[in-house]
Each structure stands twice: as structure tokens, then as C-alpha cells.
Image (tube, grey):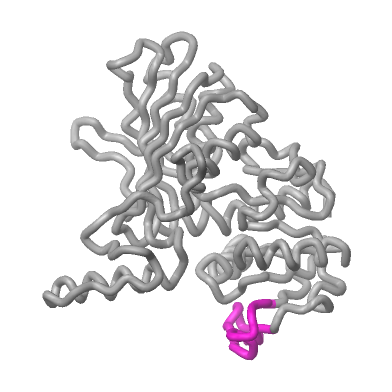
Amino acid sequence: MSKSYRVAILGATGAVGTELMALLQERKFPLNELKLLASENSAGKQVQFGDRLLTVETVQASSFDNVDLVLASAGGSISKQWAPIAAKAGAVVIDNSSAFRMRSDVPLVVPEVNPDAARAHQGIIANPNCTTILMNLAVWPLHKVKPVKRIVAATYQSASGAGARAMEEVKLQSQAILNREPPEAKVLPYPLAFNLFLHNSPMTANSYCEEEMKMVNETRKIFNEPELRVTATCVRVPVLRAHSEAINLEFDTPFDPESARQILSQAPGVKLVEDFTQNYFPMPIEASGKDEVLVGRIRQDISHPNGLDLWLCGDQIRKGAALNAIQIAELLIEQNLI
């Protein structure tokens, strides 16, 4: 009889927490018990899980007793508070916040890219930032064939990256504008409906925002390339779900677009989507709800002989967050690390 696991979801009532529950069912994760944890505001709420009705509990130290795995998606401050406690209690924590990503003693894992890094965990494994995961899935297969020297990324990030409340806010703003009423921005700093703005994460000393620096630093760590040249411009756009990214890659020598196309068509977690005759390429509306990152419009950079351009779209809530976490958990089971 195969082993089953006692799992807790920390931040169970958020957009990613809800997706984690759906994926546990979809992927037939070997569950023995599922515990839903959240703040006092959500305590007592009942949630349907398959044919069971589960009650959300307030997180406390005893919540992690006899738990094998914690899937955390409740924000950095919550993770910093509870992840070490859960790990000390004997659970493996897969954390979706930025709290532990750059710690040298915490693996930062994309299963299709650096699965072996998970072996070094000491109770906590970090799930990378959504934009980093999506980009890495498309760039890594090319990097393995011919090392990339420089990555230039421009992101088009949906409201889902700011959570369920931001998605709802965009809907309300859209309706207000169509009714010729002023849109209200409470969750995001500015109205996003029929608008876009540069990512609202805090600005750093080098004039890059934190979201952009996550893409830089996390990619270097995941690729194990501390000097890799990466730059990013992150933009929030009026799309409900699924992020898009325009990626420019520079190599030492030319990278034939057809070769890149062949490589990516066989890459795990990637789906090639392109029809140049119909001007048909990845779109966030078609990536929403999908596990794969859609990649296309692969072409020679006409400004640089060793440059290659590509476009991708991926579901931020699934592969950009919840799915990657579940895949890490599945990896731990495969490698007998949990």
C-alpha cells in the first residue's frame, strides 16, 4: 500500500490556497488528511473538498503537530512566523512567499529546472516568484544547449498576481468605467481597468522595483549562475489571470530559431504555440487554467546576431504558484525526501 501524507495549507482561503486544494484533487495527491489554516478572520469557514466539508482553522503552533507537509501561501510575514515552527515540528514546508527564497540554506526550486536542489532542504523549500518560474521554464531548455549570456525581460502581469481581491477590484473598476463612473482603487495603488502601470512593489536603491529584482536574483540562484546578466521591467496590466512576458536572450554565438523551436516543443512544462501565417501566438486568455507555459513568436533578434526573442504566457496562480508547489511536493515523494 502506497504511503499517504498529512498536509496543511497555510493561507487556505486565498487565490493560491484555493488553487492548491483544486490541484491536490486533480493530481490525486496521496492525502491522508488535509488541514486548512488561515487567519482568525477566516476561522470557522467551511470549504468543500471533494465529498468532504472542511473547516478552516486559526493557525497556531499545535496546528503542525503530526503534519508531513505544509503548503504555505499566506504572505512573507506569516511564513517567517510559522514556517520555522512547522519545520521544527517535523513538517516539510513549501513556501510560496519571498521570505526564504534568497537564503543560502533554503532551496529555490522549479522541478523542471533544478530538481536536485530539493535534496538539500532543511525543512523549508522556497517556491520562486511567478514571473521567474514562467521565464525559467522557457529559458532553461535553451540554456542547457547553449548557455545564455544575458536575459532582458518585460512582463505583462495580471491582477491575479495581487490576489483574489485585486481580480475582483478590476471587475468592479471595469463596470464603473463602462457606467461612466470613477473607478476606485483600494487593493492596487491605481485603477487597473483599461489602464496599466509599472509594478507597484517597493522600489530598491538601484531604481528597480522588488519584483524586477526577484527575477534577477532568483534566476541566478535557480540556474546556479551568480553572474548571469538579467534585467527586467515589470508591468501590471488589466488582465484577470495569467502573466505574459517578452524575453530577449543573448548568446555567445547565433541560436537558430528553428533549433530553439524544436527544443522548446519538447521541453517539459512548455507548449509551443505559434502560427506566423495567422499572427497567432500565446495569449493570457488561453493560458488561464492551463498547466503549461505557452511559448511562441520565436525569432532572430535583428538588432544582435546572437540574440533570440520569444513570447510566453502562463497561468500565474497555477504554474506560477500552486502547481509548482505541488510539483515540488511530488518531487519530494519521488525522491523519498518526505
333 lies left or right of 221: right
* Residue ID at (45%, 62%): 162
> Nearest the camera: 273 or 167?
167
- In the image, residue 287 lies at what x, y percent? 39, 51
Q: Quadrant of residue 99?
A: bottom right
The answer to if 48 sits in the magenta stretch is yes
In x, y percent, where is residue 51? 61, 83
Front in this rendered view, residue 204 or 128: 204
Q: Nearer the viewer, residue 6 or 193?
A: 193
Which residue is pictured at 51% across the width and 41% down the height? 205
- Occupied quadrant, residue 155: top left
**Magenta-drawn stretch contains 225:** no
* x 58%, y 83%: residue: 47
318, above or below 171, in the image: above
Q: Which residues are magenta?
A: 36-57
Q: Is residue 152 above or below residue 156?
A: above
Q: Residue furthest bottom?
A: 44
Q: Using the image, determine if residue 61 lies above or below residue 312.
A: below
Where is the N terminus found, in terms of image quarters?
Answer: bottom right
Q: Is residue 4 visible?
A: no
Along the horizontal axis of the image, is 88 left or right of 40? right
- In the picture provided, is 215 more to the left or to the right than 102? left
Quadrant location of the C terminus?
bottom right
Residue at the front extreme of this rendering: 205
Residue positioned 24% across, 57% down in the render: 195
Please state if 170 lies on the left or on the right of 104 as rendered: left
The x and y percentages for residue 224 are 67, 29
Residue 135 appears in the figure? yes
Q: Position of residue 94 (x, y in %)?
A: 70, 57
Q: Is residue 166 above or below residue 292?
A: below
